[in-house]
Image (tube, rainbow, N blue to C red):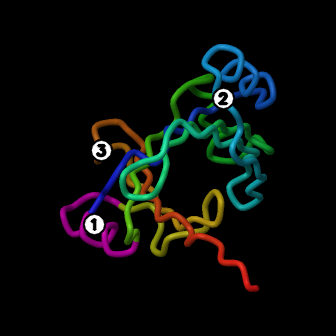
Amino acid sequence: MLTRIDHIGIACFDLDKTVEFYRATYGFEVFHTEVNEEQGVREAMLKINETSDGGASYLQLLEPTREDSAVGKWLAKNGEGVHHIAFGTADVDGDSDAIRGKGVRVLYDEPRTGSMGSRITFLHPKDCHGVLTELVTAAPPATTDH
């Protein structure tokens, strides 16, 4: 069951400049940064708020690291802006199977690794009224051994 809006993905040409805009304009601070080589992006997650299911909602700013990445191709065609919306779920595998069973194309046969160690998959935008939709199961909280 989808529990929250996990994040809104925003494609940008210059990650540092875009982060500075969201910091200066809205006061949002960077919670996490990483480079995802598989997806060809450099990203920053800006935490917006905590959610009742123990997760959080973020803005995910995405700068392509190569022109042939999905985000790079999208930026070349569309320019900067909202790239996708992501919904949080405790079970990305089960929910993507259920949604596939309703006739919606799921872009990955098996979920992949996403930001902050999450498990993700995407739904085809043509089946979601023009919106690229991501399903996200957050990584379990890190445990510390004493």
Task: Inspect the image, locate mark 3, and give the three-letter code of the amino acid beneath it.
Answer: Cys
Task: Inspect the image, locate mark 1, and give the three-letter code of the amino acid beneath it.
Answer: Arg
Marks 2/3: CA–CA distance: 22 Å
Label 3, secondary structure: give it.
loop
Marks 2/1: CA–CA distance: 30 Å
Q: Nearer the viewer, mark 2 or mark 3?
A: 3
The magenta-colored residue range is 93-105
Q: State the residue position of label 2.
A: 76
Q: Where does the image place residue 13, in percent across and percent down from the top left? A: 74, 27
Dot 1 and dot 3 residues touching (CB under 8 Å): no
As for residue 135 lying within the magenta part, the answer is no
Label 1, secondary structure: give it.
helix
The front one of 35 and 105 is: 35
The tag earlier along the polypeptide, 2 or 3, is 2
Left or right side of 55 for 104: left
Q: Where does the image place residue 40, in percent across and percent down from the top left? A: 73, 51
Label 2, secondary structure: give it.
helix
What mark, if any, has residue 100 been given in the picture? 1
Q: Quadrant of the C terminus?
A: bottom right
Q: State the residue position of label 3.
A: 128
Dot 2 and dot 1 residues touching (CB under 8 Å): no
Would you place residue 112 above or below residue 54 in this image? below
Q: From this viewpoint, which residue is outermost toward the bottom? A: 146
Q: Main secondary structure of the magenta part?
A: helix
The front one of 51 and 79 is: 51
Left or right side of 129 for 15: right
Res 85 quadrant in image: top left
